[in-house]
Image (tube, rainbow, N blue to C red):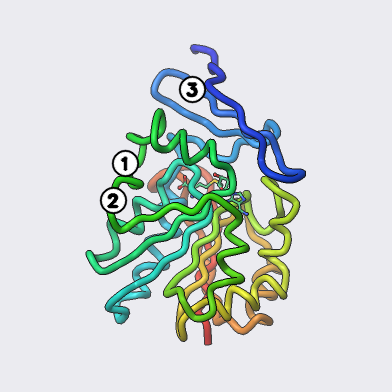
Amino acid sequence: MKPWVLLATAQTPGDGAELCLYQRDQEFAIQADDIELMNSRVFGSEKALATLACQKLTDDAKPRVLIGGLGMGFTVRSALDELGINARIRVAELVPAVVRWNRGVLAHLADNPLDDERVSVQEGDVANMIKRGRGAYSAILLDVDNGPNALTSMDNDWLYSIPGLETAHTALKPHGILGIWSSEQDAAFAKRLGQAGFDVEEFQVRSRGNKGGHNIIWIAERI
Ligand SMILES: C[S@@+](CC[C@H](N)C(=O)[O-])C[C@H]1O[C@@H](n2cnc3c(N)ncnc32)[C@H](O)[C@@H]1O
């Protein structure tokens, strides 16, 4: 098997991880401090995060969706495929280099989602956009770590705390959806979602179509 080739590195702002972009033949991987954050062959559950959330938005004539973060763009692509022409998708990505990679060497992986005119990209912490939200969003989709434990940046812990979840609740429209991706189950986190005022559904999804490992997606409705 061919070895991985390191294409680029980038430092996460603050005290965060170093991201490394690797390629092996047609396959790409992004690692955060040597832990795989994303692989271009494994995106079933990243797409399911958007599908499960956007399918709940059928009554919203002008869906407004916030997605954090960009990764390789599979969640964004899936949201675009689910939503109509009146939708607007804002993508928050903490690491500017990830945005550059998605406009360059990674762009084809999810069929160039950043070229769609419904999409706008904000370089920065999705937490800041959630704090400014105040009833703005039909859905907020979070896939910024490997689950409700900070990995990319220690500041991400706030997103999974009761204050963070209550702020996300405030940023959503009535009956808006908070969707969160996780590599594994976390009963304490699911309980916190309920405590923050959400009606919670938990889905177990496969990472590669009907194959691969199992990941967890929480679809939490603002009540
Ligand atoms: C696992 S990847 C996302 C994968 C993505 N769902 C996809 O379909 O490819 C995590 C991404 O979140 C970004 N990220 C981490 N913390 C963030 C934050 N606080 N705000 C915005 N983006 C963040 C990382 O730089 C990385 O690009």
Q: Is residue 65 above or below residue 3?
A: below
Residue picked out by circle 3: 23
Q: Residue at x 72, y 64 (%)?
A: 158
Q: Amino acid at mark 3?
A: Gln
Residue 55 at x, y = what percent? 34, 70
Residue picked out by circle 2: 116
Q: Are marks 1 and 2 in contact (CB under 8 Å)?
A: yes
Task: Determine whether the residue tagged by mark 2 lies in a helix, strand or loop.
Answer: loop
Q: Is mark 2 within 8 Å of ligand 1?
A: no
Per the model, the C-alpha gap separating discs 1 and 2 is 8 Å
Q: Quadrant of residue 126?
A: bottom right
Marker count (numbered): 3
State which tag comes first along the sequence, 3 or 2. Answer: 3
Q: Taking 38 as reference, is 150 left or right?
A: right
Q: Which mark is residue 112?
A: 1
Residue 44 at x, y = what percent? 42, 48
